[in-house]
Amino acid sequence: MNKRPTRREIPDRYPYMCVDMDRGKHHMRIPSMMAVTKLIKGMDRAHLAILMGIAGNTSTGAVLSVLKDSGPEVIAALAALIGLAWYHEDQDLETVRSPDLLAYGEQVYEELHDEGYTLSEISALALVLVRAIWEHSQLSAEVQDRAGFFFPMLGMMRSPASTSGSTTSDPPSDSEN
């Protein structure tokens, strides 16, 4: 890791978060859905299913068991997620982000490992990020559901060129009231 020449200011708002660990506070910037989508695209379906199973699990021990059995691709994906989210006040990762996010994750894992992070710490940090992303995506789904409520109403409001030949967007005449 590289020591930052100046301390990074951490905003107290979304998408920034602080994760308290035994080794201290870790400030993270929750990756955008665009970045997460690119990471998911690089994974095969079996490993993606494992990752989603990890997201729903609350036991770090159970997560570690899954990680040990699932192979390096899932571990690389979790480390890539940490790399994408890394926003430490005093330390920058040495690993340079690359278009191949799984290869990037392998390098981030090795860097964290060299700094003394255990698989348990890496998985716990990644798990917090996965849950934060999941919660954010659920909010987005709620917003979409609410927006979807209006689509049928908007469909009723057709222009005169609509196939029904009538429009509900015209104000009612005095005789209709």
Image (cartoon, rainbow, N blue to C red):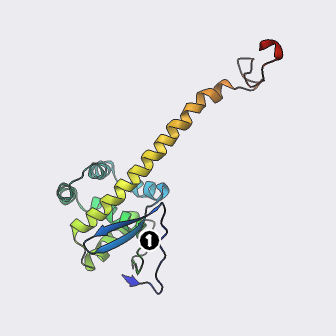
Q: Is the C terminus in the top left, top right, bottom left or bottom right quadrant?
A: top right
Say if residue 29 shows up in the picture. yes
Q: Residue at 82% of width from left, 12% of height from top?
A: 175
Amino acid identity at mark 1 = Arg
Q: Is the N terminus in the top left, top right, bottom left or bottom right quadrant?
A: bottom left
**Count of numbered badges drawn on the protein:** 1
Residue that label 1 marks: 97
On the picture, is 90 further left or further right than 120?
A: right
The residue lying toward the viewer, choosing from 173 and 74, is: 173
Residue 59 is situated, as x and y percent measured from the top left of the image, at 20, 54
Q: Residue at 35% of width from left, 54% of height from top?
A: 131
Q: Residue at 23% of width from left, 59% of height from top?
A: 71
- Residue 3 lies, with reference to residue 149, above or below; the image says below
Residue 172 is situated, as x and y percent measured from the top left of the image, at 78, 19
- Residue 120 lies, with reference to residue 113, above or below; the image says above
Residue 62 is situated, as x and y percent measured from the top left of the image, at 18, 54
Asked where in the image residue 174 lies, by quadrant, the reply is top right
The residue lying toward the viewer, choosing from 142 and 3, is: 142
Asked where in the image residue 160 lies, by quadrant, the reply is top right
